[in-house]
């Protein structure tokens, strides 16, 4: 509770605390700007959250994808599924690479992260239908979709399709096939 102006804070940290910068590239960009660096160094900083990491292997989009796969709070299983999926993508892309003629090999993308990003980009919608009522009649009107919602929908569609198709197979195998197909626009 702030006695000066009678405002009540619902956060542990007051609003003048700054979010931490934990990624190396953002820190290096901050070092280039001396005025912001001085302001940042003199301000109180919130502690980093437990899922914030400066690891080279951390990827925010893959973390979101893992969270969307997770059911009943079992993140260990979700991570295992995502890891197996990326492993299967790599194996399938290597098989494709070795089975194609040498003049076409340079066009094959072997990195599973790049394939995943391409699949998400290809599945991302641009418009969404929204109900608008005029004169007592409800109309479905296409409206632009915001970036986070579009990203969520594209990942959710891939996961749902894999879950619906994968009755006999493991989810990671079907998910890998769907991501590769989505990356190829199929």
Image (cartoon, helix red, strand yellow):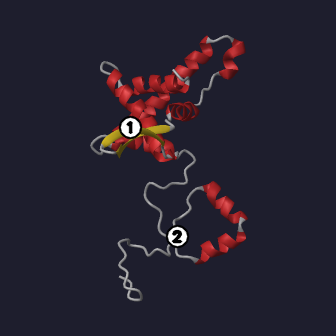
Q: Residues within 10 Å of mark 1 (few under 14, many from 20)?
A: few
Could you say where residue 94 lies in the image, as x and y percent from the top left? 57, 20
Could you say where residue 149 lies in the image, as x and y percent from the top left? 44, 44
Q: CA distance from mark 2 to mark 1?
A: 42 Å
Asked if labels 1 and 2 touch by Cβ distance under 8 angstroms, the answer is no
Secondary structure state at the residue bearing disc 2: loop
**How many callouts does the rendering have?**
2
Task: Answer whether residue 184 is visible to the viewer in this image.
Answer: yes
> Which tag is nearer the camera, tag 2 or tag 1?
1
Q: Residues within 10 Å of mark 2 (few under 14, many from 20)?
A: some
Task: Answer whether residue 70 is visible to the viewer in this image.
Answer: no
What is the residue that sits farthest to the front in this orientation? 135
Q: Quadrant of residue 37?
A: bottom right
What is the residue that sits farthest to the bottom in this orientation? 4
* Nearest the eye: 62 or 14: 14
Looking at marks 2 and 1 on the same chain, the residue that comes earlier in the sequence is marked by 2
185 on left or right of 50: right
Could you say where residue 147 lies in the image, as x and y percent from the top left? 51, 45
Secondary structure state at the residue bearing disc 1: strand
The circle drawn on residue 56 is: none
Q: Residue at x 52, y 33 (%)?
A: 116
Q: Residue at x 37, y 81 (%)?
A: 7
Q: Residue at x 60, y 78 (%)?
A: 42
102 on left or right of 72: right
Residue to which mark 1 is pinned: 140
The circle drawn on residue 18 is: 2
Could you say where residue 76 lies in the image, as x and y percent from the top left? 35, 42
Task: State the quadrant of the N terminus.
Answer: bottom left
184 on left or right of 137: right
As drawn, 31 above or below 180 = below
């Amino acid at each position: 509770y702030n006695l000066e102006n009678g405002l009540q804070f619902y956060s542990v940290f007051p609003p003048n605390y700054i979010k931490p910068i934990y990624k190396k590239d953002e820190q290096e960009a901050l070092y280039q700007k001396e005025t912001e660096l001085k302001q940042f160094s003199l301000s109180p900083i919130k502690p980093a959250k437990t899922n914030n990491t400066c690891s080279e292997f951390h990827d925010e989009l893959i973390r979101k994808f893992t969270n969307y796969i997770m059911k009943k709070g079992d993140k260990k299983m979700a991570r295992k599924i995502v890891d197996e999926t990326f492993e299967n993508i790599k194996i399938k892309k290597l098989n494709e690479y070795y089975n194609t003629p040498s003049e076409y090999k340079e066009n094959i993308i072997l990195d599973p992260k790049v394939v995943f990003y391409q699949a998400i980009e290809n599945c991302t919608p641009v418009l969404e239908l929204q109900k608008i009522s005029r004169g007592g009649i409800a109309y479905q009107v296409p409206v632009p979709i915001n970036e986070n919602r579009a990203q969520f929908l594209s990942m959710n569609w891939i996961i749902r399709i894999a879950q619906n198709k994968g009755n006999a197979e493991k989810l990671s195998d079907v998910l890998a096939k769907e991501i590769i197909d989505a990356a190829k626009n199929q």
